[in-house]
Amino acid sequence: MITRRTAAATVLSAATFVSAMAFGAGSASAAEPLPSSGTEYRISSYAGGALQWDSRNAGSNVVVRDWNESSAQQIWSVRDEGNGAWSVKVPGTNNAVDRDRGKNTVGAWNYIGADNQKWWLENTSMGNGRAWLLHSASDGNLCLTRGADLNARVASCDAGDPAQSWNLDRTTGTTPPSANRPTIDLDYSQAPDLGPWLEQQKRTVADYYPTISDLITKGAFGAPTYFKIILDPTVKANPAYTTVRNGVKEIHVNIDYTRGNRNDTGFLVHEAVHVAVWDNPTSRPWWLGEGLADWVRDYNFQPGTGAQHFGPTTTYDSGYQATARFIDHVSKTYAKPDLAHLLNTVNYSDQIWVQLTGKNAQQLWNEMPK
Ligand SMILES: [Zn+2]
């Protein structure tokens, strides 16, 4: 029998007492305390990974992803809603982990205090007594579960199932903010006549930088809020490149290119994408990083400018415009508006395409009009 614990600290259930006693004398008082209402927790699964929200929009997916200490999307606000029931919300929103009564799927939806938006906590013996089952308040026999497909869902409760056993750890660090308008320092000492041009570019790039973050990180990790743009006479091969020196991100710009392309701001936006994701703790191949930077430029900053035609040797992992068009194709054809964001917040694997669309990357590239 499952016994419900309430927020009243003096009411310890028989089940909790028995499970604590099972550890023997000396650990009999080790039951995990209930969460502190209204504070933020990471919720990690005994089957691996941590509970994660996709976005701050109502209807956000609730998934399980690799534990990521710097991901704001793995932080949840946990609140005592009375009668032993708790809500689990996306911080800064009113969207709570919500059980779909029909499908038993789980998403983050606007909290109205409904039973299917509340959970009661059962402390179990797993993890030296640290684990919790989260029972749905609308059907106590159903518990929050890490699905095999890494989507959260509910399933029949089983205190021995690692996929239903969760740790609640209070967050220690502060939540990384979405990027604000950055501070950008300029160095045009090597081409003073281009100073007014660069000042103008700086305003445009700074204005657009928060949008870059919204498109591809959504606060999942902190985008640098300070960087430099340097007119650099040693840059000859490319229009620009991004690097870090003494901890400061720097965009080095080809002076000759600039003189011949005064109307081009997009190449600086491409570099600003590299700046924004520089501290990304997850990994992806070079071609995807370049494709994402061009996707921001060609399908968002200056939409409609993406290349449409590619030769027979070009493919999805050719990087730059080819990969950008591929990302645009998959996100629109398969209704994945958050694709670029997802690609920037998980460790890349070729399997991601199959998981999202049922097709591998080469099949998706082949079907793309070009
Ligand atoms: Zn690049």
Image (spheres, grey):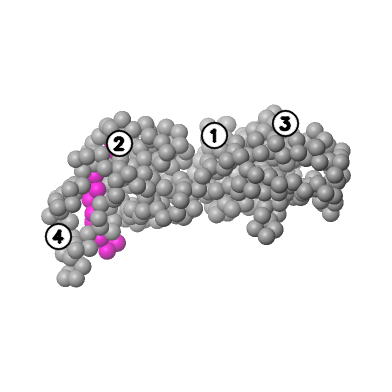
Residue 117 belongs to the span the image colors magenta: yes
Q: Earlier in the sequence, mark 3 or mark 1?
A: 3
Q: Position of residue 139 (x, y in %)?
A: 22, 38
Queried on whether the Cβ of the residue with tag 3 lies below 8 angstroms from ligand 1, the answer reads no
Q: Which residues are magenta?
A: 116-129
Give the quarter of the figure containing the C terminus. top right
| Mark 4 in CB contact with mark 1 (< 8 angstroms) | no
Q: Earlier in the sequence, mark 2 or mark 3?
A: 2
Amino acid found under the numbered disc labelled 4: Val
Q: Earlier in the sequence, mark 2 or mark 4?
A: 4
Amino acid found under the numbered disc labelled 3: Thr
Q: Position of residue 201 (x, y in %)?
A: 74, 37
- Give the residue displayed 30% in from the left and 53% down from the top: 165
Residue indicated by mark 1: 337
Residue indicated by mark 4: 18
Q: Earlier in the sequence, mark 2 or mark 1?
A: 2
| Mark 3 in CB contact with mark 1 (< 8 angstroms) | no
Q: CA distance from mark 4 to mark 3?
A: 66 Å
Q: Earlier in the sequence, mark 4 or mark 3?
A: 4
Residue indicated by mark 3: 305
Q: Earlier in the sequence, mark 4 or mark 1?
A: 4
Q: CA distance from mark 4 to mark 1?
A: 49 Å
Dot 3: few (<14), some (14–19), or many (≥20) neighbours within 10 Å? few
Residue 142 belongs to the span the image colors magenta: no
Q: Work out whether residue 315 can be spotted.
A: no
- Give the residue displayed 75% in from the left and 35% down from the top: 200
- Give the residue displayed 45% in from the left and 54% down from the top: 173
